[in-house]
Amino acid sequence: MSAETTASLPPQAVEQAAALLRAGRLVAFPTETVYGLGADARNDAAVAAIYAAKGRPRFNPLISHFSEAGAAFAEVVEDDRARALAARFWPGPLTLVLPRAPGSRISELAAAGLPSLAVRVPAHPLAQALLRAAGVPVVAPSANRSGAVSPTTAAHVLEGLSGRIAAVLDGGPCAVGVESTVLDLTGATPLLLRPGGVPEDALRALLGPIGRPDPASAEDAARPAPGMLASHYAPALPVRLEAESVSPQEALLAFGPALPGAGAVWQLSESGDTMEAAARLFAGLRWLDAEGQRLGLTGIAAMPVPEAGLGAAIRDRLARAAAPRG
Ligand code: AMP
Ligand code: MG
């Protein structure tokens, strides 16, 4: 990715930071847990830039942040449990995983292709001010390079991401320093996907029993959690990797100049740009799957994608789409 100058902005510059977010740029900001790396959650290219800036080797699902519960619930299908938790713990360090609302405009890349969305309303006054000023949902994983420790000061953010993001909004050190508790409410029993700032006891007092994801259970395998990414969206049509030619009976996922002769073509990036390709990946898989089935095609052929940049994450995702399923 191209290097840029990272501005360190004082709290008074909230409007400037919000304008950067709306323009599709990356802005780090403090929450009560850790510094988050923010991008407009509806902008595929901005979300792709987050994975690139962090150097994430795969597309983990990201949490979308909102200034208030009403805006968060507009993107998901909430139930009584979610409303009770929101009333008690929002704003605060609790993330709820719920089914995506049919009309949600959150980027599929932000959800890593999952049918669920993770939503949170942070309490930090500067995060609140930024989210209100931005007026768009903001995805914000921790503002560190992949594998590095989560940052709790603006200086930590700059150590890892200086030159890779547009700005950091400096609100001083974060108070909690641990990440948000992630609770999955997509099934009958709430599942604790990640312990964090809101203790499990406090959740149990409100909800009753809380489970843990069990990789051996078929129901839980359908409720994706960290480390259980095999259950991410897979096309119904079989996927063939590293295609060097394509038949008229196949749909083509093209990267660079498209191979001739396919029954349908989705271009990830004509110029071979892995960031553009990442932004178009999930929409492409879905479109080729639907169009391929409509036309009676037999499979999806994926052209080779190099490892560089976001290529490794794209290759990881394509390998999962091509893996045999039970
Ligand atoms: P981070 O952004 O680094 O705080 O991590 C985000 C956490 O939320 C990870 O543990 C993700 O796996 C989890 N997460 C985000 N979206 C979803 C989702 N749709 N389903 C399950 N877990 C999610
Ligand atoms: Mg993180």
Image: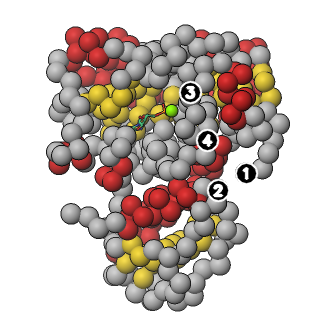
Q: Residue 296 location, x and y as percent?
A: 33, 81
Tell me the crowding category of disc 2: few under 14, some 14 to 19, or many 20 or more residues within 10 angstroms, Cα based: some
3D distance between C-alphas at marks 3 and 2: 22 Å
Q: Earlier in the sequence, mark 4 or mark 1?
A: 1
Q: Residue 140 location, x and y as percent?
A: 56, 32
**Residue 1: which disc?**
1
**Could you tell me which secondary element the residue under label 3 belongs to?**
loop
Looking at numbered disc 3 in the image, what kind of residue is underneath it?
A: Ser
Q: Is residue 241 left or right of residue 227?
A: right
Q: Residue at x 77, y 21 (%)?
A: 9
3D distance between C-alphas at marks 1 and 2: 7 Å
Looking at numbered disc 2 in the image, what kind of residue is underneath it?
A: Gly
Q: Earlier in the sequence, mark 3 or mark 2?
A: 3
Looking at numbered disc 4 in the image, what kind of residue is underneath it?
A: Lys
Location of mark 4 (residue)? 54
Kindly tell me whether residue 234 is visible in this rendering. Answer: yes
Q: Earlier in the sequence, mark 3 or mark 1?
A: 1
Location of mark 2 (residue)? 309
Q: Residue 289 location, x and y as percent?
A: 39, 69
Tell me the crowding category of disc 3: few under 14, some 14 to 19, or many 20 or more residues within 10 angstroms, Cα based: many
Tell me the crowding category of disc 1: few under 14, some 14 to 19, or many 20 or more residues within 10 angstroms, Cα based: few
3D distance between C-alphas at marks 3 and 1: 22 Å
Question: Quadrant of the rendered structure where residue 72 is?
Answer: top left
Quick check: 69 above or below 326?
above
**Could you tell me which secondary element the residue under label 1 belongs to?**
loop
Q: Residue at x 42, y 82 (%)?
A: 250
- Decide: marks 1, 2 in contact (CB < 8 A)? yes
Ligand 2 contact, mark 3 (Cβ < 8 Å): yes
Q: Earlier in the sequence, mark 1 or mark 2?
A: 1
